[in-house]
Every structure is written in structure tokens, then in C-alpha cells.
């Protein structure tokens, strides 16, 4: 399993990277909006510097037509670095862009996937990662686990190199279900990770351990014995 942070917040990336062994960071225009009107390329380069070149970095195009999507991709690759995974929504135009980028050996993440058809076409177009939107599928009465299982089956059957990068979650339960359905990777907002550990049962268990220890050894730690 691989975990990525779905955020552009520098403090969050720095803080939670101490706890979670992430393999990358993902971003999109809605995530960037949360940071305000930042100096976009300076900010993206700061993220890259923070996570290093050994981790994947996924940045989404904002153009809507072929030429503007390709221009966005070119700007990202030149102003950040050429190892960035260009995120492209799986529309008809997006599929054309994915194929064109892969013809140039550029890393691509196919995103905004809600249906099996989108995913199958992303596989055939050569995307390196494909991002099915788990919670959004649920909200549209689509079974996200069934969709992810279908993608995993096709990847296994036809030996695609594409990885399933599950996205759009409201809690860790959905993340776990995505992995169990066959996703190799998941990108998660750090608030979901924090929420998963804000569990009173976890805190209570730790408190009991501490109390039991102190009842025998007082305030001395193991290292002080």
C-alpha cells in the first residue's frame, strides 16, 4: 500500500510527513484554492523540495481544451521539474492529452474518474496512475469498490503498468475499503488521518497503560530504571 497526501499546505506536509511514510503528494485546482492566491510555481517547487525527488508529485492542468492542457503540462514540467505526474481529467479531450503526453514519455495521472468506462480508456491510453473518486462515486449511487475491483481485474488480466490511485475520501474507512478492493495507492487529506487517530478508545488504552505502569514504578520511565 502507498499513501499520498492530498494537499498543497506546506505546514501540513511537513508535520504529517513525520508520522506517515508517504510516497507522494497530489494537488488539484480546488486544493490550491484553499491556500489562497499563492505564487503557484514557487509554492509547487517548495513542495517538491520538501518531499524530495524520490516521491511522486502530481499537479493538475487547468486548461479545458487540448492546446491549453498541453501548454499547462509544458509549463509545469519546465517550471517545477520533468518528473512531475501531470494530472489530466478523463474527458474525451483529456484522453487525447494523456495519449499525447505518454507519446513523449511524460508521467501522467488520469483523474476525475467516476465510471468503469473512463478507467478502462485511461488504462488503454497509457496513464501511469488512475484516480477513481471514491466518495463522489458513493454520492452518485455508484459502488466504488466494484469499480476499483474492475480496474484491478483488468490491470491483472492484461498486465497494465497503471496503478490505481484512489481519491476523494471522507474517512479512513473508505480508504481501507479502497485498498481491500484492489487500489495500490490512495491520496488522503491530512484531516482524515488526524481524525482517524482522534479516537477516544486509543487515548483510553494509552492512559490505562500509563496508569498501570505508574502504580508500580511511579514516574520513572523504563529508560530511568
Image: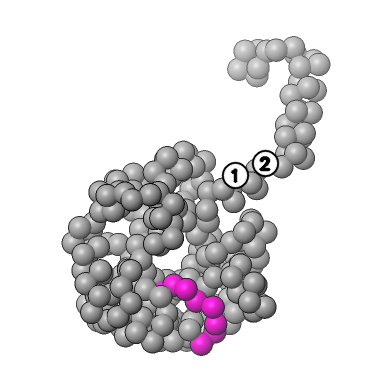
Q: Between residues 44 and 178, which one lies in front from this camera angle? A: 44
Residue stretch in magenta:
110-117
Residue identified by numbered label 2: 198
Residue 194: which disc?
Answer: 1
User: Can residue 109 be spotted in the picture?
Assistant: yes
What residue appears at the point 44 percent right and 86 percent down from the top-left corner? 121
In contact (CB < 8 Å): disc 1 and disc 2 = yes
What residue appears at the point 51 percent right and 87 percent down from the top-left corner? 117
Query: Residue 171's spot in the image, x, y percent?
Result: 64, 56
Query: In which quadrant of the rendered view does residue 204 lie?
Result: top right
Q: Between residues 12 and 218, which one lies in front from this camera angle? A: 12
Query: In which quadrant of the rendered view does residue 57 lie?
Result: bottom left
Q: Residues within 10 Å of mark 2 (few under 14, many from 20)?
A: few
Q: Taking 104 as reference, is 7 left or right?
A: right
The furthest residue to the front: 37
Q: Is residue 174 above or below residue 95?
A: above
The answer for how far apart the CA atoms under marks 1 and 2 are is: 6 Å
Q: Residues within 10 Å of mark 1 (few under 14, many from 20)?
A: few
Q: Between residues 97 and 216, which one lies in front from this camera angle? A: 97
Q: Is residue 6 above or below residue 215?
A: below
The furthest residue to the left: 78
Amino acid at each position: 500500500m502507498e499513501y499520498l497526501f492530498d494537499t498543497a499546505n506546506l505546514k501540513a506536509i511537513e508535520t504529517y510527513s513525520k508520522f506517515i511514510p508517504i510516497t507522494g503528494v497530489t494537488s488539484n485546482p480546488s486544493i490550491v484554492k484553499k491556500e489562497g492566491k499563492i505564487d503557484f510555481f514557487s509554492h509547487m517547487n517548495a513542495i517538491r523540495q520538501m518531499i524530495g525527488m524520490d516521491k511522486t508529485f502530481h499537479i493538475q492542468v487547468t486548461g479545458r481544451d487540448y492546446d491549453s492542457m498541453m501548454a499547462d503540462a509544458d509549463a509545469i514540467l519546465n517550471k517545477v521539474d520533468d518528473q512531475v505526474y501531470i494530472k489530466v481529467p478523463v474527458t474525451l479531450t483529456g484522453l487525447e492529452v494523456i495519449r499525447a503526453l505518454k507519446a513523449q514519455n511524460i508521467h501522467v495521472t488520469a483523474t476525475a474518474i467516476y465510471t468503469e468506462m473512463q478507467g478502462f480508456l485511461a488504462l488503454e491510453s497509457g496513464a501511469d496512475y488512475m484516480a477513481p473518486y471514491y466518495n463522489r462515486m458513493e454520492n452518485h449511487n455508484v459502488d466504488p469498490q466494484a469499480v476499483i475491483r474492475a480496474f484491478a481485474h483488468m490491470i491483472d488480466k492484461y498486465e497494465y503498468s497503471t496503478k490505481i490511485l484512489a481519491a476523494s475520501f471522507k474517512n479512513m474507512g473508505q480508504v481501507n475499503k479502497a485498498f481491500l478492493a484492489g487500489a495500490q495507492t490512495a491520496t488522503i487529506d491530512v484531516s482524515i488521518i488526524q481524525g482517524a487517530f482522534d479516537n477516544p478508545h486509543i487515548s483510553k488504552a494509552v492512559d490505562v497503560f500509563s496508569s498501570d505502569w505508574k502504580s508500580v514504578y511511579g514516574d520513572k520511565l523504563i529508560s530511568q530504571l
